[in-house]
């Protein structure tokens, strides 16, 4: 039997979402099971869309035959014929993917009109103006959507007709004007395409269906899918439905309604409608829609029926519904229902209310909230009215969420001095790119804007860790001059002290001081988090380098620190001086002297991290970046260092030159530093163990087990070598203290070879933590700082659907991770495994981490609640 490619609404149901798309399956459910007033129609499946692409963007005969059969049926049930000169059948053709993608794909209304049918339509409706208006709109929409003829050509003709007549609004055009427009529109079509506007409704329909399938791959749909983790191979369904008209006089109308407020979650029907109007009029804003409550007076019976059906829909789907309806001459029709999009605040309230109303259980409630959306609750946001009035001057990568406004500064020092901490104003730090030296300035700024760098660039990673808004990689900025203190964007030159505003959640940049407000966290938030904690298996730790970050993360529910990047601690106060002395030492003795100055700082930092985590695990990662990143840049700093080191300026410059590498990310960094300079590992071990011993003493009821993590290992002997320094130092200190404190030594898995030799490496590692930033970089061979420059062409050419640095590549990098976990555990059954790359805070990556049996994920503090919720969703999905 031939495969079924087309389903009538009465043949489907809500459980066929994958095949019929969201709109199609709900129309089927409402028709087939709920017997609601739905105009007749049918759905062409998402599989037909996939087939269209497999078939070189064409439909097979089997599919077109089934469409034609269903069209015949549609004519029969409606008692109307396509193209009928007395009473033609008109249909809408609308997309509908599995996941809703509002406004991303195409829709065509009034299909079936032609030169003859328009007359029949005029007769039947008794309204020639309306008929010709529908026809000219159809030609316009069809030309644009199906044939890609520019909209502006049509707009020009409309303007011309109105100007000649001296009128301002479209509604002032009479039937003759509209007939004239139809004539002109058909000419535009012919001039552009060399053929007449199709008069056969069957041809129109096939063209429209192909256009909807094609629109699955339009650029805005591709971007939307990437942002919302929707796979490209899902495809869209196409719904062909009999048109009903809300513009047949004052007993007709059209509207949109929600069963709960999508902004706040408050229960009650929220919506708007317009009498004597089509959907477009509501959107166009020419007339102001009425609140739905006024329908009660206008049409009491329709109102009563609407309220009953809307409430019924919510009770049936057990979720807030977003509905479209039309009233045609006093008869109510539903055209669509779907689970409504909502803000995070509304999502939380609705989930809690539905649990209290007995509609859903806790696990379902947990799956109802989009984990990523919790971001909205944790960072400041722009005041909506202020944002509406603001002038957008550009956009770049949304590197770290939140809204920020302030005066432009160009250096970290200026940010510190002119910022609030320096008793100044709010500041936005604008840099070509940031470096570790900028840390204090970044901390002082409300927001950070960089010209270069991707989602895992220094600025992005550090800003996310701090919870500071950051927009990165704005290559539209020209003439940035940190000396002259100015840059140009959108033709405007900004100087130090000028206000700009950044939206780190969208990547948008605005001119001026746009008002922000603190996001409010409702009491229900904690309740949902409590449910998430009850149902998740994965533990959630945080990446934190400072006591402030650690405290914030703890407040947000972190169960330990999964990654402390110790190098980030070297920039506060005078520490950098001692650190530079260490780097620019010639002898072990000299180096040890400098390290001795650093050790107490580190020890104190570690103590504070341990205190913040109250006895929960803290993983300290040993020095990782290439040392060249830390050397002095200015002549003044070089001279200062030479003086303290008792060296000449030239000697220091020679050392700095010697540290330069062609490919620093693959150079002298990670554990390679500890192989060359074991005294660094010795100092860091000392700081870790001494701090843990002190904290253990202060809190005898805590069970301190410090975790030392060796980065960038690729070979078991390399790990063994560094580990020996660690254990020799630690064992001695613990024995001297008369303690029996345990500690663990583990490794990061961030080089493919480490993953491939995990069975060897696990002999020396008590834990693995996947550094998926480097693991992605090394597996793809893409620089994590530069990939942003070419990834766009990978999306455009459908080579990639998403950024592998933001969403874990489960096919490649993920395979290495699974291999490493499985093989590591064969050697050491109690090996514990986690992830601390940026993917540790990404919901779809967390789902994969749950699947391969990791023990924890670790992410920046502000992503901790997101990870808690995503971990629970992963566990519940896997259970189902
Ligand atoms: C990683 O590589 O994933 C990681 C966490 O380490 P870093 O980002 O500090 O290189
Ligand atoms: Mg790394």
Image (cartoon, grey):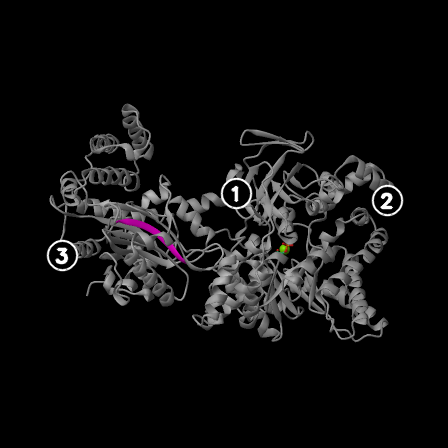
- The magenta stretch spans residue 258: yes
Q: Label 3: how many residues lie within 10 Å, few (<14), some (14-19) or many (20+)?
A: few
x and y, in percent, of residue 165 in the image: 27, 25
- The magenta stretch spans residue 548: no
Q: Secondary structure at mark 1?
A: helix
Please tell me which of labels 1 and 2 falls first in the chain.
1
Which mark is in front, 2 or 3? 3
Q: Which mark is residue 385?
A: 1
Please identify the dominant SS of the magenta region.
strand
Q: Tell me the residue at 67%/33% (across/down).
A: 496
Please tell me which of labels 2 and 3 falls first in the chain.
3
Q: Tell me the residue at 78%/35% (across/down).
A: 635
x and y, in percent, of residue 279 in the image: 31, 46
848 displayed left or right of 571: left
Which residue is labeled 3 in the image?
A: 76
Which mark is in front, 3 or 1? 1
Choose between 724 and 251: the one closer to the eye. 251
Q: Where is the C terminus found, in terms of image quarters?
A: bottom left
Q: CA distance from mark 1 to mark 2?
A: 58 Å
Q: Where is the N terminus found, in terms of image quarters?
A: bottom left
Q: CA distance from mark 2 to mark 3?
A: 94 Å
Which residue is labeled 2 in the image?
A: 645
Q: Label 1: how many residues lie within 10 Å, few (<14), some (14-19) or many (20+)?
A: few
- Region in magenta: 252-259
In the displayed structure, would residue 684 be above or below residue 361?
above
């Amino acid at each position: 039997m031939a495969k079924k490619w087309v389903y009538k609404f009465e043949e489907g149901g809500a459980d066929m979402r994958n095949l019929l798309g969201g709109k199609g399956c709900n129309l089927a459910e409402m028709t087939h099971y709920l017997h609601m007033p739905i105009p007749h129609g049918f759905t062409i499946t998402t599989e037909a869309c996939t087939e269209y692409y497999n078939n070189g963007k064409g439909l097979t005969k089997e599919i077109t035959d089934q469409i034609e059969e269903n069209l015949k049926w549609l004519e029969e049930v409606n008692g109307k014929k396509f193209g009928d000169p007395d009473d033609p059948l008109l249909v809408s053709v609308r997309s509908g993917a599995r996941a809703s993608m509002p406004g991303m794909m195409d829709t065509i209304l009034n299909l079936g009109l032609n030169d003859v049918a328009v007359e029949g339509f005029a007769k039947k409706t008794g309204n020639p103006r309306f008929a010709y208006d529908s026809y000219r709109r159809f030609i316009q929409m069809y030309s644009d959507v199906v044939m890609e003829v520019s909209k502006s050509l049509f707009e020009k003709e409309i303007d011309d007709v109105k100007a000649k007549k001296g009128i301002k609004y479209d509604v002032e055009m009479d039937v003759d004007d509209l007939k004239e427009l139809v004539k002109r529109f058909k000419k535009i079509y012919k001039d552009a395409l060399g053929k007449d506007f199709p008069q056969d409704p069957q041809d129109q329909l096939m063209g429209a269906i192909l256009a909807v399938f094609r629109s699955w791959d339009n650029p805005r749909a591709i971007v939307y899918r990437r942002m919302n983790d929707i796979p490209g191979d899902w495809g869209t369904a196409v719904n062909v439905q009999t048109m009903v008209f809300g513009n047949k006089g004052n007993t007709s109308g059209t509207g949109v309604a929600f069963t709960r407020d999508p902004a706040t979650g408050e229960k009650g029907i929220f919506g708007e409608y317009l009498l004597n109007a089509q959907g477009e009029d509501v959107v166009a804003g020419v007339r102001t829609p009425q609140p739905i409550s006024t329908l009660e007076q206008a049409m009491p019976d329709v109102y009563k029926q609407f309220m009953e059906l809307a409430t019924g829909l919510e009770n049936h789907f057990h979720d807030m519904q977003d509905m479209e309806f039309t009233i045609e001459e006093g008869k109510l029709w539903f055209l669509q229902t779907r689970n409504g999009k909502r803000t995070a605040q509304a999502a939380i309230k609705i989930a809690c209310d539905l649990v209290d109303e007995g509609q859903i259980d806790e696990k379902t409630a947990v799956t109802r909230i989009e984990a990523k959306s919790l971001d909205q609750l944790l960072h400041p946001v722009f005041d909506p009215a202020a944002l509406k009035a603001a002038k957008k001057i550009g956009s770049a990568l949304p590197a770290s969420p939140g809204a920020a406004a302030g005066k432009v500064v160009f250096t970290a020092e200026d940010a510190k001095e002119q910022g609030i901490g320096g008793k100044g104003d709010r500041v936005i730090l604008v840099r070509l790119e940031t470096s570790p030296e900028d840390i204090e300035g970044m901390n002082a700024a409300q927001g950070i804007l960089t010209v270069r760098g991707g989602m895992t660039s220094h600025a992005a990673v550090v800003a996310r860790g701090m919870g500071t808004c950051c927009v990165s990689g704005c290559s539209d900025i020209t003439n940035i001059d940190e000396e002259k203190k100015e840059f140009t964007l959108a033709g405007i030159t900004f100087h130090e002290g000028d206000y700009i505003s950044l939206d780190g959640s969208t990547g948008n940049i605005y001119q001026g001081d746009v008002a922000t407000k603190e996001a409010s966290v409702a009491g229900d938030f904690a309740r949902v988090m409590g449910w998430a904690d009850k149902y998740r298996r994965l533990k959630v730790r945080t990446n934190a380098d400072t006591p402030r970050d650690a405290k914030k993360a703890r407040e947000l529910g972190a169960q330990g620190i999964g990654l402390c990047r110790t190098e980030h601690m070297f920039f506060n106060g005078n520490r950098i001086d001692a650190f530079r002395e260490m780097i620019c030492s010639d002898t072990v003795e000299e180096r040890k002297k400098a390290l001795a100055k650093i050790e107490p700082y580190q020890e104190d930092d570690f103590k504070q991290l341990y205190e913040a985590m109250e006895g929960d695990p803290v993983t300290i990662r040993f020095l990782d970046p290439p040392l060249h990143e830390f050397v002095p840049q200015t002549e003044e700093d070089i001279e200062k260092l030479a003086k303290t080191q008792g060296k000449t300026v030239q000697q220091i410059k020679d050392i700095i030159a010697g540290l330069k590498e062609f490919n620093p990310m693959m150079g002298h960094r990670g554990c390679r530093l500890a192989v060359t300079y074991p005294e660094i590992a010795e100092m860091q071990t000392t700081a870790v163990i001494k701090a843990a011993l002190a904290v253990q003493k202060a809190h005898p009821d805590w069970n301190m087990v410090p975790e030392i993590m060796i980065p960038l290992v690729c070979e078991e002997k390399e790990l063994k070598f560094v580990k020996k320094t660690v254990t020799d130092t630690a064992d001695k200190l613990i024995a001297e203290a008369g303690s029996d404190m345990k500690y663990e030594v583990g490794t990061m898995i961030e080089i493919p070879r480490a993953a491939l030799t995990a069975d060897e490496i696990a002999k020396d590692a008590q834990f693995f933590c996947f550094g998926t930033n480097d693991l992605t970089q090394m597996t793809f061979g893409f620089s994590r700082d530069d990939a942003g420059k070419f990834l766009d062409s990978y999306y455009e050419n459908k080579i990639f659907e998403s950024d592998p640095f933001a969403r874990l590549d489960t096919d490649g990098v993920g395979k290495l991770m699974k291999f490493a976990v499985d093989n590591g555990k064969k050697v050491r059954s109690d090996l514990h495994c986690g992830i601390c790359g940026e993917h540790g805070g990404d919901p779809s990556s967390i789902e994969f981490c749950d699947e391969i049996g990791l023990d924890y994920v670790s992410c920046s503090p502000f992503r901790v609640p997101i990870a808690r919720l995503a971990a629970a969703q992963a566990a519940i999905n896997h259970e189902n």
